[in-house]
Image (cartoon, helix red, strand yellow):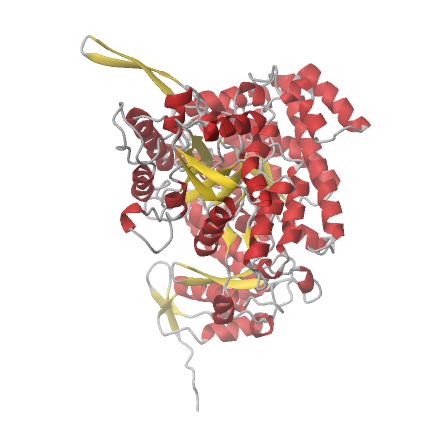
Amino acid sequence: MELYHRPTTVINREGKIVPIDISKIRNVINKACDGLNVDPLELEMDAQIHFTQNISTKTIQETLIRVANEKTSLSRPEWTLVAARLLLHHLYRESSLKRGEPYGSFRKLVEELVKSERYDPRLLTEYSVEDYEFFQMAIRPERDLLFTYPGLKHLMDRYSVKSGDGAYFELPQDIFMGLSMYLALAEQPEERVSWAIRFYEVLSDLMITMATPTLAQARRPFGQLSSCFIDTPDDSISGIFEGLTTFAKISQNGGGMGVYLGHVRAMGSSIRGYKNIGSGVIPWIRLYNDTAVSVNQLGQRAGAISIWLDLWHKDIVDFLDLKTNNGDERRKAHDVFPGICVPDRFWKCIENGDPWYLMDPHNIFEVKGWRLEDSWGEEWEKKYLDCISDERIEKTEINSISLMGLILKSLYETGGPFIFNRDTVNRMNPNKHAGMIYSSNLCTEITQNQSTTMNGEITVKDDVILQTRHPGDLVVCNLSSINLGRCNTPELLSRVIPVQVRMLDNVITMNNLPVPAAKITNMKYRAIGIGISGYHQHLVDKGIEWESDEHLNYADKLFEHINYIAIKASCDLAKERGAYPMFPGSDWETGAYFDLRGYNDEKWLKLKEEVNMNGIRNGYIMAIAPTGSTSVISGSTAGIDPIFKPIFTEEKKGFLIRRVAPNLTLENLPLYKEAHKINQFWSVKAAAIRQRHLDQSQSMNLYATEDLNEESFMELYHSAWKLGLKTIYYFRNYTKEEHESDNNCEACQA
């Protein structure tokens, strides 16, 4: 009995019914499987089961992709490459309808995109016809074969410039070349083409990735290129609402935000001399929450914001309860990400069993004339003790271990708060001469000087209202990550990082920031954030176990080398373009940066002298972002985290996508130990070793393990502070029930 009837006709791209040509389908499959350890006949047979009479050729293509993707498994990971090649075939066919052939005239593509106002017109006016001939020759279509299926689909769905009806204009190499040309506009005219091609080389070979806003916007008109911002609103109605406006503008233009609310008075504080009428920080946080929901990021996702508060702030207990599912919903904010700023003194109180005191920052300012939050380290501790002993200051005593218990409860239930060890951060701040750091950003890797923008005098002239403003430091993050999965030797790192530093410095120059204070801060410090992705992949490729001293020793050498090359590149750039404006008096100039990190061998001493003489281009250089999105494109593991699983399935808009660890084999499977099975103290130790080589911080998550108890949970965070970690990102809970309900047996997925 015949169970399957092969269709005899299909509907082609012109909408006509024509006889099915199995030989064409077979040729596409064979080409996609060429050179890979897969059976093309297996794909042909399994896909044909889903074919129906008068099926469209587009649906046939989509079916082949879906079936190949579903075949991706532990024992046959190469099916993800087959799915990627089939998607490429579809993209090339669609592109050919517009361009005659895949990667046809690049200049004509740019002309069309400029005409439709999807590309910046400077890409035509600043480059000649001859320049485009060089660009055309430099494009490497064969590098499209580097993509896995999730990476290619993610790149095209999220970052490719499309027509009004959703059709693809750009192919992958067009994206990389357009971005490179745009950033090269910051170069001298006679050097733009050569630098654009060098930028393209490292991007198209997936050696580095640029942050999401840069990848999406660099080449578009008025592109905002930065990932994250940090604001520090004043304790006033105008200050808070200016902060909300700032967040709305930044979110509208694709940026995430961290907001420090430690200046804002607590609940029950006085206002204009009237006591006990202050509403505290929670109502303002709810406004930020609603703004995040209302103003999305370039239409791609909801606005994203972290709110930071000092651990001694009187509203801290309610703050820790923001995202839990119990309590008064009128005091909840489920769409913000809370973070707490923790001084050394708190950890010492936990060690000694001493009490902790909660106070109102406005009350302190009224009594003392200074703000406790405006100091750090020994000065902060001295002022804190002064406040405790001053009877004029209202305070609430709380057991320090009990408060830590509330923090751990929130972490276990909600994944937050994020942790910011403020004294450690400021102690290692290379620009402490110019200010201080109050909090971090949305992903906890950025630590840069912050200050409040102050409103000045308002005047009315000729029926026009004029207001002066004194801009503070509104932090801007300009990020890019090295893909250690491909840029995996000291020689490659030494070649690629200088190009990466230059690209990021050009991001600063070419950026179109939506807030004036951010523009000023961006130019003042010229801060960048060199990070990495593919860390776990890199260890596996080197045969290094996560839970080993070999890992710790290797991490120390690796990140010292990366940091050295990045600093050297920024110093060389300063010789060419000048140092960042705040360089005089910085730890870079005095050499304290190098002394604090124990960089005292001959190589480092020489660089220290070179930086002192010539300056450095970028006031902040190293910061490791999570790379959750861009690591998918590069086919690497995300950031510095261990993998969640060697292979798992994601659902995207009703479509199941199989994700597999890079270069996975049955032999290296034991090295791909899952995050929830790793002893987290090894991750903390590794992060502490990396931290020495980062002038900023790192997006480092901690994971729940089966043997986690309250004592080890607390010790995990205490040891992180003790070892010198600046920040901790999420706590990723993974309960036994979730573990059992989620099919986690590798054999079943093979």
Identify the residue at image location x=53%, y=22%. Answer: 525
Q: Where is residue 41 in the image (x, y as percent from the top left)?
A: 56, 73
Residue 615 visible at all: yes
Q: Which residue appears farthest toward the right when viewing the image?
A: 602
Identify the residue at image location x=36%, y=40%. Answer: 298
- 152 vs 274, left or right, is right
Identify the residue at image location x=53%, y=49%. Answer: 633
Residue 92 visible at all: no
Q: Position of residue 314 (x, y in %)?
A: 39, 37
Q: In this view, does 539 lie above or below 219?
A: below
Q: Position of residue 271 (x, y in %)?
A: 27, 26
Q: Which residue appears farthest toward the bottom when viewing the image?
A: 1
Q: Quadrant of the C terminus?
A: bottom right
Q: Position of residue 505 (x, y in %)?
A: 56, 27
Q: Which residue appears farthest toward the left when viewing the image?
A: 463
The quarter of the displayed image where residue 494 is located: top right
Identify the residue at image location x=51%, y=39%. Answer: 211
Q: Is residue 179 above or below residue 73?
A: above
Toward the viewer: 183 or 731?
A: 731
- 239 vs 476, left or right, is left
The quarter of the displayed image where residue 122 is located: top left
